[in-house]
Structure formats: structure tokens, C-alpha cells
Image (spheres, rainbow, N blue to C red):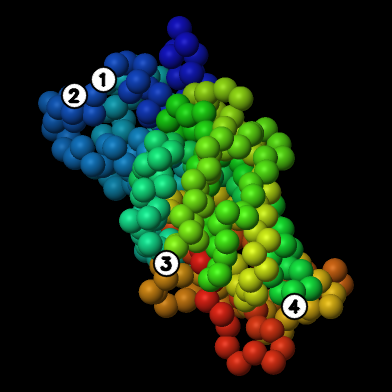
Amino acid sequence: MSDDRELRVALREGPFHVALRAAVEARGLTLDRLRHRLEERGLRVGMTSLSYWQQGLRRPERPESLRAVRALEEILILPPRSLMGLLGPPRPRGRGQGGIVSTPISYATILEPSRALSALLHDLDGTADDRRLHIGGMYETLQIGPDRSVVRRETLQVVRAQEPTDRHIIVYRGDLGCDVERVRIRALEDCRVGRVRRDGPTALVAAELLFDRRLRVGETQVIRYELADPSGVETTEYERGFRFPAGQYTLRVSFAASALPVGIRRFARHDHAAEEHDHGELTLNAHHAVHLVADSLRPGLIGIRWTWPGRDQDLPVGARA
């Protein structure tokens, strides 16, 4: 009964990949069995494609793929057009917003060194390919102090469960000179801090944010947390890494009145080695702050960079994921 209830909700509210996964789970079929049933109808769909459809990493758009979706409605004993109706209009092909491509990317692409990070995630029973949560929206605010260092970072996220889960793992990499033992994470709303793991040589911190219950597929959760790094390291940029497609991202950076930067710009790139895209100058407002808003994010990095008066070049900083 629970599976049927979840399936009805998923078919009514979507999105497509959540409804497809709920239907497959409710009918107790494996992807291999689905592939075989489609082949019996003369439709060839690979296991990888079926898996990506379920995870929201790709969506069926070609004519043969759409025929397969109509066949899946019959195989999974669903109302006609219940899955087709969740697909909506075709999405643009090619490169995404700001030149960031839509293919999922690994932690190593946006956050190095990957070996140290893998060890931290292993201690938290996580993986570098964790796909349990989809980020529907994120609002992040950064406060830069008089000493030109980040004195406070607060993050509000809305996530949707792609798989049953009761937690979200956050990863932070401090600037050069960061003392990870001083980094503190504080849960503010609808979550609590679980295990925290640190790696001094790479300035990496990974932590669990635990929910009050286990989310079912398709359910959403709002979490708000604060990260404080009192290392006092001067910084000249902040960037956020996304390994999978995400919804809207807003980043606001405010500066102390006694330490205002010059030459503030937004940027985006596929990975650390890629050419930057989405260049744009930002102007401080009356509150000594700037912000950027990005919709329908593709995997990659996005952030804001600035220059301090008297500095000829920016200092390197790390990514957050």
C-alpha cells in the first residue's frame, strides 16, 4: 500500500525520473527485466539509459526513446500518458548556461585532491558518486570581515530525495593556511550535525547533516546550516561546485565597510582546468554586497571573484561542494 501511495503522488507531482523510479519499485521489476520487456516490443534501450532516466541524469527525448516511455507505461501498468505528461517540452541540447555542460562530473573534477576526499567520505559511509539528493534550490551568503577573510558562511538548501536517505553530506575545502581543527559547522534549521571528518594537509572537511527521519523517494527537505572558519586567511573568491544538474543557486557576498574590494566579477567553468565562462562585472550596493543568481544549473563551478586594493593578482582558493 505504501508503494502504491508513493507511486500515485509521484505520478501526480513528478518529476519524470522520480515517477519512473517509483513505478519500477512498486512493480518489483529490475532494469534488466524492463530492458528485456522493451526488446520484446522491438524497442532497444540500454541499461545505462534506463538507469540515467531513473536518476534524472538524462531524459528521453528522441522519437525511439519516447516510444519506449509509452511502452513503459503499459509494462508498468500505469495510466496512459502518465509518464509522458511529466516530460514536458524538450530541453535545449548542447552546452548549458554559462558554458557548463550537463554531463554529471566527479568530485575530482571540482574538488581536489580526490584521494583524501574519498578517504573522508569512506569514514562517513559515503561515496564520491552519491546521487541520493537533488538540489532544487540553494541560497548562500558569505560575510567578509575587516581582515579580508571569510568570517561567516550560511547556506539554505532545498533537496529532493532521489533514493531513500536520512542525511546530506557537505564538503568544505579551506583556503591555503586553513586550520581545519578550527572549522565549525552549526545546524540552524531542520537538521543536526552528525559525524565530522577533517584532513589537515588538504584543508578538507566533510560532515553529515542528519534529518529527523528517512526521506522517501520524491520527498523534499529544507536544511539551513552555518560554517565558520576562523583561520583568518585572506581570500579573493568564492566558488560552489555542483556535480549534478541543480535548480536555482543564489550567492550573496558582503564586505566590511573598512575593507572594500575592487574589480568584482562573477564566473563559471566546467572544472578547475577549463576556460571560464559567464563573465560579468558586479557592483557593490549600499550594503557593501554583491550577488549572483543562476537557474537550471549544469554540473561545474560557479562563483564570485574580487581584487583587493594594492593587489596585483588574486590568491587561489578552494571549492565547496
How far apart marks 4 and 3 lie (CA) works out to 25 Å
The numbered mark, 2 or 3, whose residue comes first in the sequence reads: 2
As rendered, which of 143 and 300 lies closer to the eye? Answer: 143
Which residue shows up at 61% across the image and 92% down it?
312
Residue bearing the label numbered 3: 270
Q: Label 2, secondary structure: give it.
A: helix
Residue bearing the label numbered 4: 283
Which residue shows up at 29% across the image and 37% down it?
51
Q: Label 3, secondary structure: give it.
A: loop
Which residue shows up at 65% across the image and 83% down it?
307
As rendered, which of 276 and 39 lies closer to the eye? Answer: 276
Q: Nearer the viewer, mark 2 or mark 3?
A: 3
Q: Amino acid at mark 2?
A: Arg
Image quadrant in which you'd find residue 265: bottom right
As rendered, which of 46 and 321 lies closer to the eye? Answer: 321
The numbered mark, 1 or 4, whose residue comes first in the sequence reads: 1
Q: Is residue 184 left or right of residue 100?
A: right
As rendered, which of 220 and 47 lies closer to the eye? Answer: 220
Label 1 crowd (10 A; few <14 / some 14-19 / many >=20): few
